[in-house]
Image (cartoon, rainbow, N blue to C red):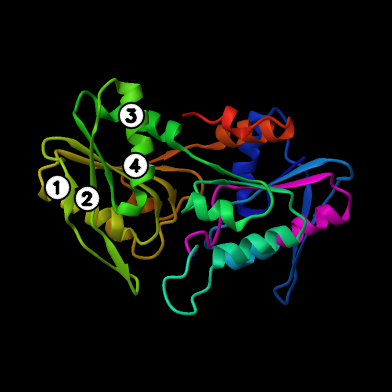
Amino acid sequence: MLFAPGASEDFGRGVASELGQDLAALETRAFEDGEHKLRPLTSVRGRDCYILHSLHGDDEQTVNDKLCRVLFFAATLRDHGADRVTLACPYLAYARKDRRTKTRDPVTSRYVAQLIEAMGVDRVAVLEPHNPAAFDNAFRIPAEHLHARAPLADALLAHLGDSPLAVVSPDTGGAKRAAAMRHLLATRTGREPATAFLDKHRSEGVVTGDTVAGEVAGRTAVIVDDLIAGGTTISRAARACRERGADRVYAVVTHALFAPGAERLLQDPAVDRLFVTDSVAPRMQDLWQGRVERVPVRRLFARVIRALHGDTPVTEVLDP
């Protein structure tokens, strides 16, 4: 049984269609005092249940609203006899705060994992958590981290032509993510892209550093990152690549949160095109001006759910 509460209904309906079935019906009620209720409208006893929900804030609900709702709903399914409950998250909230960087810092990603486990969820499947190793360590239940490299690469290749490439990580922490995309692009094109990265530092929310290590001159620079929030990181990387002679600059990003401030990125002439998945609902569309391409990942989630339901290893259905 597939459930997709609230703003994730359209995404869930697409996944369900790929699986050849309908979403399971549920009742959603919001009370005058701000409390809420989600209730399945058919029996879940003995069923393998999947909750498809992207936990990002939007114009209707905050991150915390969505998280609270999905936790209560998972517990409801467990209370009423679901055989297994899997949370399938295109975007998982709080995944970026996965370590202590200052004295007495919280490790919020681990706290969210504990909440999910406490509500009786058996498994989670998340699209590109910020730090896969920290994500693995946060959960005691089976946790699958998915990637969107293949559909993003396919969309990108339709625009590249024969231009020589440089795959750019906007910081050293994203080097493995960029290396995986570089390998995939090399396999698909038969040409080895150059590698580059920026020396980026973040403190008190301020990003500094624009030194590019690697060759981008005369190439199409492909900046690879897991998410865009305010857009500062991508903008700085794009301008640095332009200053060092890149012919074109594309950005390939999984999660397009487009938080306040991202309008500067969307209007930045240093970036020729942004490729993002539909893991979160579209925002600031009036500023896209044909420069943002949304790449669907619903088929990916359908393949993963089919594998989980059949107890097949997820790695066997993920593209390279």
Residue 162's image quarter? top left
Asked if the residue under mark 2 is in contact with the one under mark 1, i.e. CB atoms within 8 Å, the reply is yes
Q: Residue 309, position in %: x, y?
A: 73, 34
Residue shown at 81%/52% (left/top)? 77
Q: CA distance from mark 2 to mark 3?
A: 20 Å
Q: Which mark is residue 22?
A: none
Residue 152's image quarter? top left
Hey, what amino acid is under mark 4?
A: Ala
Identify the residue at the far top of this view: 190
Which tag is nearer the camera, tag 2 or tag 3?
A: 3
Asked if the residue under mark 1 is in contact with the one under mark 4, i.e. CB atoms within 8 Å, the reply is no
Which tag is nearer the camera, tag 2 or tag 4?
A: 4
Hey, what amino acid is under mark 3?
A: Leu
Element type where label 3 sits in the image: helix
Q: Residue 314, position in %: x, y?
A: 61, 34
Q: Which mark is residue 238?
A: 2
Q: Residue 272, position in %: x, y?
A: 24, 43
Residue 155 counted in the magenta span: no
Asked if 179 appears above or below 106 in the picture, the reply is above
Looking at the rendering, the stretch of residues picked out in magenta corresponds to 71-97
> In the visual, does 120 lie left or right of 132?
right
Q: Which residue is mark 3?
A: 185
User: Badge 1: how crowded within 10 Å, few (<14), some, or many (20+)?
Assistant: many
Residue shown at 35%/53% (left/top)? 173
Q: Nearer the viewer, residue 296 or 237?
A: 237
Is residue 61 shown to the viewer in this render? no
Q: Which residue is mark 4?
A: 178
Q: CA distance from mark 1 to mark 2?
A: 6 Å
Q: Which residue is mark 1?
A: 242
